[in-house]
């Protein structure tokens, strides 16, 4: 089954769980949650493929949740994801090391096994300006 849901992910998770009746039927979930930066990220015509902290441009997304509010945001979604995962299901998470620690604690609380597979870093090379604009400054 192929399905694209556009909108608030908690509504999408509830839809999958209660309307599509996919409880314990999902084998893989990939999530790229906010990083709790407390910032807004913008996009401009010059940077159509990437977002930045620039004050110019329009807001692509806000990453304003921090602290307990951020942890509760993640916890609510992980509860629903756990209900959707099959017995052999896995969750792949893209986040920084701080986010990894928060996720690990939450997943352990739900008695889910946490396997750390690696960290990927990428850096812009200033010498190649055109190429460097297309590559984010730092990775995860």
Image: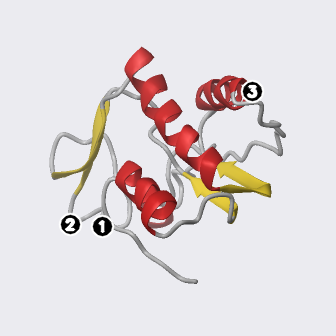
Q: Which of 126 and 77 is in front in this view?
A: 77
The quadrant of the rendering that contains the C terminus is top right
Residue placed at 66% from the left, 32% from the top?
Answer: 100
Mark earlier in primary sequence (1, 3): 1
Residue density around tag 1, few if under 14, some if 14–19, many if 20 or more, within 10 Å = few
Q: Nearer the viewer, residue 65 or 59?
A: 65
Percent coordinates x, y for residue 64 in the rendering: 30, 30
The quadrant of the rendering that contains the N terminus is bottom right
Image check: 57 left or right of 47? Answer: left
Question: Mark 1 highlights which residue?
Answer: 48
C-alpha span from label 1 to label 3: 38 Å
Question: Mark 2 highlights which residue?
Answer: 45
Badge 1 vs badge 2, beta-carbon distance below 8 Å: yes
Percent coordinates x, y for residue 6 in the rendering: 33, 67
Element marked by disc 2: loop
Q: Which mark identifies residue 68?
A: none
Question: Mark 3 highlights which residue?
Answer: 108
Residue density around tag 3, few if under 14, some if 14–19, many if 20 or more, within 10 Å = few
Residue density around tag 2, few if under 14, some if 14–19, many if 20 or more, within 10 Å = few
Which callout, 2 or 3, points to the residue nearer the camera? 3
Badge 2 vs badge 3, beta-carbon distance below 8 Å: no
């Amino acid at each position: 089954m192929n399905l694209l849901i556009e909108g608030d992910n908690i509504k999408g998770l509830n839809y999958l769980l209660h309307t599509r009746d996919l409880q314990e039927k999902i084998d893989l979930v990939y999530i790229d949650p906010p990083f709790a930066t407390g910032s807004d990220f913008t996009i401009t015509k010059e940077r159509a493929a990437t977002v930045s902290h620039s004050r110019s441009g329009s807001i692509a997304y806000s990453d304003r949740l921090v602290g307990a509010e951020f942890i509760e945001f993640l916890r609510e979604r992980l509860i629903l994801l756990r209900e959707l995962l099959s017995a052999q299901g896995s969750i792949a998470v893209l986040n920084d090391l701080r986010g990894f620690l928060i996720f690990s604690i939450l997943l352990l609380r739900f008695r889910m096994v946490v396997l750390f597979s690696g960290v990927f870093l990428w850096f812009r090379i200033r010498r190649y300006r055109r190429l460097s604009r297309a590559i984010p400054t730092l990775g995860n």
